[in-house]
Amino acid sequence: MSRVPTSTLTDLIDLAKEPSSAKRRELLRQVTGVFMTNPDDISGPEMELYDTVMSQLTADMETVVRAEISASLSQAQRAPLGLLRRLAADDIAVAEPILTRSKALTETDLLHIVSTQGQDHLRAVSKRETVSEHISGVIVNRGDDDTLHTLLSNDGARLSRASNEQVVQRAQSNPALHEVVVNRTDMPVDLMNDMYFVVEARLRERIMRENEKLDPAALELALSKGRNKVAVAYGSFPEDYEKISAEVDSLRRNSRLTPTLLAKYMRDPNPTYFLCALSQMADLDFLTARHLVEKKEIDALAIACKAADLDKALFLTYAMIMLADQENAMGKAGEYARLYNELPKETALRTIRFWRMRRAEGHAA
């Protein structure tokens, strides 16, 4: 089908006033078909005429027809922008093809949509082949958890540091977001480590694998970017913390804080002794140490013990104490023994650094 001369398009403006909806529908399909034969060659006054004719014809069409036109125009690199913008803000059945695929919409157009429309429209934009940091930032601010899941599942969506921090804060209280956050290939590694204590075992393993890959320069860069991270509060210090912490610190400075003493503290009725000793030996803050012990985070305890260069037997002794009330305690202990053997000390130290930085920032906040 050849292009319609400008004079013919002008005549079509009058034809578009035809009262018969069936005739208007057929005319719209014909004009759309003509436009789609050579959309890249149309510009200037001719594009404006197409916009006028197609907008007037589309105005009173039923949803199924508008959706059909939307699907056609979504494939064009260039399209009548007035019509395209109206369709993009239409019912989601009409808008979705344009919002997910159209390359004719500008960044400004997309920002207007995600700033003014509802969750269905935000989810459609989140599926685009590429989503800029600016647009993603608005979606993170306005989107519900389903929309956020859609955005994070899209490898073509770019997120700023601030948006990633906001995402991690929301994901920590929403298990449905855990996997998409941890699996983001561009998630800053320090923020990924913020997810460690809230995700399930297989996702913790992914975090540890990422930590193992880090070279020292990348580690320092990741740590340096953590100024405004989210802190997770584990509670206040016990009343005897300062006294016992000072006592344990004195033992450490006099080289008397040993694995043997730590083993003794394991069975002390006052857990503050063990927690102070573990935190100082592993260079871990007290609140994180208490969290992993009270919540029986045995895999995290393995990281702390490995960082402290403790013997596997000592780690397993405490692991068995923590597993005492569980079924198949010996079998589970065997799994943790394997984990301890396979965990490189350097990886444990890197992970501890993220935990330590996170708690320090929490106190500052």
Image (cartoon, rainbow, N blue to C red):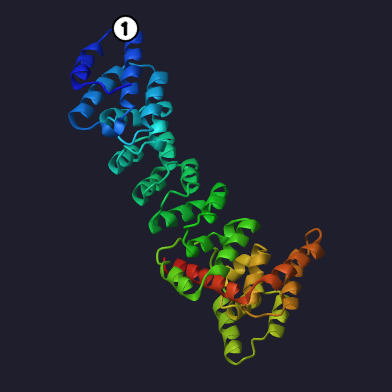
The local secondary structure at tag 1 comes to: loop
Question: How many numbered tags mark residues here?
Answer: 1
In terms of image quadrants, where is residue 2? Answer: top left
Residue drawn where x is 62% and y is 79% of the image = 308
Instruction: State the residue in front, 201 or 169.
Output: 201
Residue drawn where x is 66% and y is 66% of the image = 299
Above or below residue 299? Residue 259 is: below
Residue type, numbered disc 1: Ser
Farthest top residue in view: 20
Quarter of the figure that contains the C terminus: bottom left
Above or below residue 188? Residue 18 is: above
> Where residue 3 sits in the image (x, y, percent)?
27, 23
Above or below residue 278? Residue 290 is: above
> Where residue 314 sits in the image (x, y, percent)?
73, 77
> Where residue 212 sits in the image (x, y, percent)?
57, 69
Instruction: State the residue in front, 28 or 256.
Output: 28
In terms of image quadrants, where is residue 208? Answer: bottom right
> Where residue 249 sits in the image (x, y, percent)?
57, 85
Residue drawn where x is 39% and y is 19% of the image = 65
Q: Is residue 285 among the parts visible in the rendering?
A: no
Farthest bottom residue in view: 254
Q: Neighbour class for label 1 at 10 Å: few (<14), some, many (≥20)? A: few
Q: Is residue 238 left or right of residue 159?
A: right
Instruction: State the residue in front, 354 or 85.
Output: 85
Q: Is residue 201 among the parts visible in the rendering?
A: yes
